[in-house]
Image (cartoon, rainbow, N blue to C red):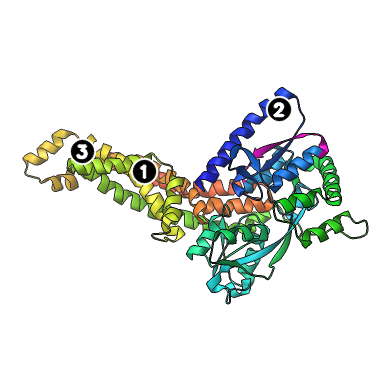
Amino acid sequence: MLSRTVASLVVSVIGVLGPHTAAAQSVAELRWGGDAEGGAPFVEADPDDPSRVVGFEVDIAGLLADGLGRVPRFIQSGFTTLDASALRGDFDIALSGIEDSPSRRARLAVTIPYHQFREVLTVREADAARFRTLADLRGRRVATLGATLAFDLLTRAQVDHGVVPVTYEEDVHPYSDLALGRVDAVLLDDVLAERRVRQNPGLTNQPTDVGIGYYVGILAPENAPLRDRIDDILKQAMRDGRLEAIFRRWQMWNDDQRRLYARLTSATLPPPTVETPSPQMGAWETVWRYLPSLLGAAAITLGLSCLSMALAVGVGVVVASGRVYGATPLRLLLTGWVEAIRGTPLLLQLFVIYYGLAAVVQLPALVAAFVGLGLNYAAYESEIYRGALNAVPAGQLDAARTLGFSERQTLWLIRGPQAFRLALPAMTNDFVALLKDSSLVSVITVVELTKQTSILAVNIGSWVVPGAVCAAMYLAMSLPIAHLARRLERGWSRSKP
């Protein structure tokens, strides 16, 4: 995962530098967006040369650019933001295993389908006899990617069959978690499923298709004329075999594609259609429908933040006390731990705790999130407490010793209470920061407030209203905490001798 992310960053840098090169050559470009983190056979950084990307989407982009008399230029974009980036005009077209859907057709210019896929259920070989369909998975955790046909199918199955959808940001860890027993099945398209089953012995794909979908390109609505030209190029490539050659190269050609191309290039057969869209609801109406889910996700965010902060305070006090009162070896050990935690990203720590330690201990996602957030902020809290302890005047400590107080009595009765009052403003600030940083735990499958908002935004095709609602919820959770802390500060200030 780390190497794939590094490669994705390399490709992103190239995408930024690309315009200058193209401008110097004065060559018309076809700017196409995709997610190199998606991996083969879609788009991935070439293992032999990370400065370039490879995949069947890369070949299709080259085919389209050639037909338009342009030069293709890849622009890296996260998979879940491709729709929004296309609407913004960040690129001319997005090609990255994007699935045809009514909601996309309602707000974007969508090309004709160029590949048909089947949604398949992947299970462990030991469970193949009892988990054949979604109906067999009642009460079980089924993994998928957000903003996909599979996610929509699981959402319906949640109502119809009681399955528990678990969303991931990428397609690697759903299958590794299935092999580890963290989830009971994975529902994704056959292109991904067949590749991951080959990489994970012990997994198998069920033969029954759960659904059928199509890969398409998406453009901004104002680019409909360009979309029409691209459709003509795709149809011609279907007739002359160029698309077939691409998919044969990537071992993706089958009879489904032959039938699809026959329908698209025939003057008498109707093109394939996706499910008829239901009447479009307004953004606020959709938010109202999603409100229970948003409130539930907000409860998870608040509860996780409170528990993690409690852990951070407890561990922080112990670490700070050890650094102030401990022997030299203990102080060095604790200092090294604090610097290691503060010097590495929280996101990396979450990945290590949840995925890296899975071979040793398989923590549930919420527990891993609690441990990761708590230990990360414990390092920062310990520095606050250590500074507060050292800020208590030395004269008071000497006076306590003169009166016969032990070191423990001095800490609990004199030094500790004053240090806590000094540390409170910084503690409050850290809690608000932790509340916001809890959004990172979505990478380990915890559906907290920001993740649930992202799912809503993808469904309605806009971040404006969902973002405003999400911000209001975060403010509603953080402002009372800050107000309470200020009241405590004022109360202690008045009582200060």
Label 2 with label 3: CB-CB less than 8 Å:
no
Quadrant showing the C terminus: top left
For disc 3, the marked residue is: 497
Element marked by disc 3: loop
Q: Residue at x 63, y 50 (%)?
A: 40
- Position of residue 10 in the picture relative to residue 262 (left or right): left
Density class for disc 1 (Cα within 10 Å; few <14, some 14-19, many ≥20) is: some
Q: Report the residue marked by disc 1.
A: 341
> Dot 2, how many residues are within 10 Å of its Cα: few (below 14), some (14-19), or many (20+)?
some
Viewer-nearest of discs 2 and 3: 2
Q: Is residue 75 magenta?
A: yes
N-terminal-most mark, 3 or 1: 1
1 and 2 marks in contact (CB < 8 Å):
no
Question: How far apart are labels 2 and 3 at the CA level?
Answer: 71 Å
Report which quarter residue 423 is drawn in: top left
Vertical placement of 151 versus 496: above or below? below
Disc nearer the start of the sequence (2/3): 2
Q: Which quadrant of the view contains residue 277?
A: bottom right
Q: Residue furthest right?
A: 268
How much space separates mark 3 and mark 1, taking CA atoms? 38 Å
Q: Which residues are magenta?
A: 67-78
Secondary structure at numbered mark 1 = helix
Q: Which residue is mark 2?
A: 22
Q: Position of residue 231 (x, y in %)?
A: 83, 47
